[in-house]
Amino acid sequence: MLSRIAESFFWLGRYVERAEATARLLSEHHQLLVEDRSVPEAMGCALLLDALTMPSAGVETAQDLVRVVVGSELDSSTISGAVSAARANARAVRDSLSQDTFEALNSAHLALSRGIAFTASPGVALHRVLERLLVVNGVVDWTMPRDEAYHFMVLGRELERIDMVGRLLAIRHDEMWPSSGPAAALRAAGALSPYLRTGRPLNAIDVRRFLVLDATFPRSMRSCAADAEEAVRGLQRQGVSDSGSLLREVGMLRSELEYARVPSPDDIEQFIDEARQASVRASDEVNRAFFRQHGTIVWSH
Amino acid sequence: MSVTPFDEMLLPDGRPRDGHEGMHETLAELGSSGLAERARQRDAYLDRHGITFTLGERERPLPMDLVPRLLTPPEWKHIEAGVIQRLRALEAFLADVYGPGIALKDGLIPRRLVTTSTHFHRQAWGIETPNNVRIHVSGIDLIRDESGDFRVLEDNLRNPSGVSYVLENRRTLAHVLPEIFTHHRVRAVNEYPERLLDALKAAAPPDIKVPTVVVLTPGVHNSAHYEHAFLARHMGVELVEGRDLYCRDSTVWMRTTSGPEPVHVIYRRIDDDFLDPVHLLPDSVLGIPGVVNAARAGRVTIANAIGNGVADDKAVYPYVPAFIRYYLNEEPILPNVDTFDLSDADQREWVLGRLDRMVVKPSDASGGYGLMMGPWASDEQLALTKAAVLQNSRGWIAQPVVTFSTCPTVVKEGRIAPRHVDLRPFAVNDGTNVFVLPGGLSRVALPEGSLVVNSSQGGGSKDTWVIDDGTLDEAPPESASPEPAERSLSHAVAANFSKRYNSPTSHEDRMVQQQRQQQQQSGPSPARGTDEGEPPC
């Protein structure tokens, strides 16, 4: 497979996940800011923006927050930007994507570019975007052959997911909004019902353990690491392998999370930190090993 | 008879009341076109989330009005204290009725009123509840009279429903009209499922370390099924139907893929009569044969307890202030609406002399069935009512017409007009504390001048805000007496039974039919109260 094509699939997976996770997080965070006014609005906005590595200067209200995080096509850490980047990557590999996948992504992109997210009740608009992104993942799941392209896409999605769960946990909803925060954090990961079914109480430490270490919830960092590892093994089965450091990176992260002792609050923070770093290292390794091999000649001005 | 109702938001001169200024300003800025647009978004939101109740064959969303109803900290403090007090007295009364019966011997209330109550169940006599709680969940309906005073309209101590709409209304409003919250700090409502689960666990048989709690629903055909599923999901417990459970050796078991698992607390949302075909209705297909014995043996807790309906009987209601004085030695904080016991000869004579100025209602029914509003009744209706009262005086009570408060409400095309509201605060008793959920369900009669506000006829609800000024902390610790409530079976169901005997149906059909029949005095059928008290201004 062409490196360029592989790279597009990898980033398609990453950007779709980024857009979805950010939209979900923004929607829940916004609702929390509106409903629970115990934290000053500007501070509540800054918490989310810091976690997303976006500048918070001048963002005073929940409405400003939506404007900034929905953002523009030019900045791929915003929702519009991530959708737009996902679509650009999808266009590059359009021939290998099912028509449904491209259409769903395209309609999310069009909706955002028409400014639906700026209507007065952002929750309604964000939901429309989310719905379309869910369609992308759904169609990929049941139409895409489990080939090289698929494994690159899943690898990108899982690495991004680890990063996004890390950002979500960095907001510390549990400390800022002690009564409604833990539930909001779970909702932002789509995890509230699965969590409640385990019978655990809604307290800060149990919620963080769940989002990092749970074995069955697909968005826990542990599950993401396991899925990333499986994607790398899938690539190996197709004859695509790096020097071994990529598998080592995701495999070690997976085993560390899988065989962890019941961690103390400090341990948990350390796991979160390590997982995010491992995700960055793995992404760099993918890039180095498959897309920009040593010796690639790059023209620059 | 034209009395000006109290308006919740506006002073008589049209200016907003203290604390309502911010909300008033936001609404003015939006204007009717803005509100109409938000109303469309709200409908889409409710549809999409499937926040519905079932009426007849159809599922429909519970209409939520965009204008919240606001309660100030002093107002809420008063309501909270009054609800807790009333619950403690009602708990004491139930413990007495199903125990020593001291109040009956003392003549506090005529024994005949208790024993003739449709919802008095001899089968429950002598069943002791583990933490002395019978009313785990209650919903006492309040109205606000012309002078702005809160009064109790009725007690709901069986299966009060509507709490899921309290939580959903808050989320929905924050979703579609976020700016209305800008100027207010509103107390959160989302801790309710946790508090309920804690209270249910606290009610488990004492030797059980990790109790298994389940929510028992009549099934998907019941009008309040959405709420049953909501509560089970938010508490993280199983939602079961009667056929999922069975009793053996006085223990209740749940059928699971890993074999039978014991159940310790059943939060049941089916009516007393259907609970146990061994002791109650023999042809119930919704219940669990033997569960009453298991409860008597102390192996399982049924919440709310069996037989609570005797305490929310409308003919018992006039005696509740006396219960408060007798059991608690306190003066009632929330007064009743004046009510006349028509089985008392003197009161009956007085009422029949001025029937055209009274509201007459059946003592054991709900939902406005059989209600007669004197001022708007024809001579023929008056005569019929009089005959009915004379024939079965225990079956009826009478009240003067009460004008209850209005709240600005979005009507057609985003216009705002006053509509009548009531309030159902929900309280949870864990045996140590009574937690009153800040706010409750405000039900609103949407059609102008409408007297019947069942949701089938245009009733809706409002997000209800309790303002947080930092002075309201936890509810004061109280001992064991919250009140759950709801009524269920009444005339309408009894009628269906006789019908069913005539036309034999399959087991499945019976199940569907019985599931529907559980009336679940639900939130979605707003304000029985409204029917009774509201003159068309």
Image (tube, coloured by chain):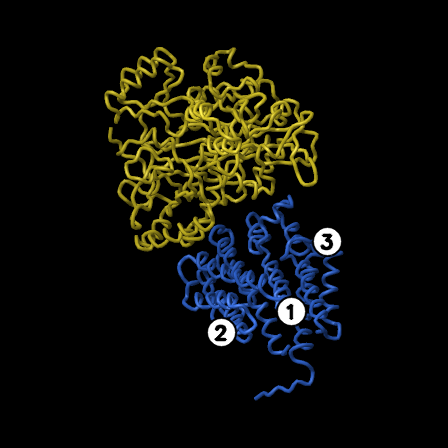
Chain colours: A blue, B yellow
Residue at position x 45%, y 53% from top? Answer: B175
Q: Earlier in the sequence, mark 3 or mark 2?
A: 2
Judge the density around disc 1: few (<14), some (14-19), many (≥20) Cα neighbours within 10 Å: few
CA gap between label 2 and label 1 equals 31 Å
Residue at position x 61%, y 40% from top? Answer: B237
The amino acid type of the residue labelled 1 equals: Asp
Cβ–Cβ under 8 Å for marks 2 and 1:
no
Residue B285: image x %, image y %? 55, 29
Residue bearing the label numbered 3:
A263
In front of the other: B300 or A150:
A150
Residue B17 in view (yes/no)? yes
Identify the element where label 2 is drawn: loop
The amino acid type of the residue labelled 3 equals: Pro
Residue bearing the label numbered 2:
A74
Judge the density around disc 2: few (<14), some (14-19), many (≥20) Cα neighbours within 10 Å: few
Which chain is disc 3 placed on? Answer: A
Residue at position x 43%, y 25% from top? Answer: B499
CA gap between label 3 and label 1 equals 37 Å
Which chain is disc 1 placed on? Answer: A
Marks 3, 1: nearer the viewer: 1
In the rendered image, the vertical position of residue A47 relative to residue A84, given as above or below:
above
Identify the element where label 1 is drawn: loop
Residue bearing the label numbered 1:
A147
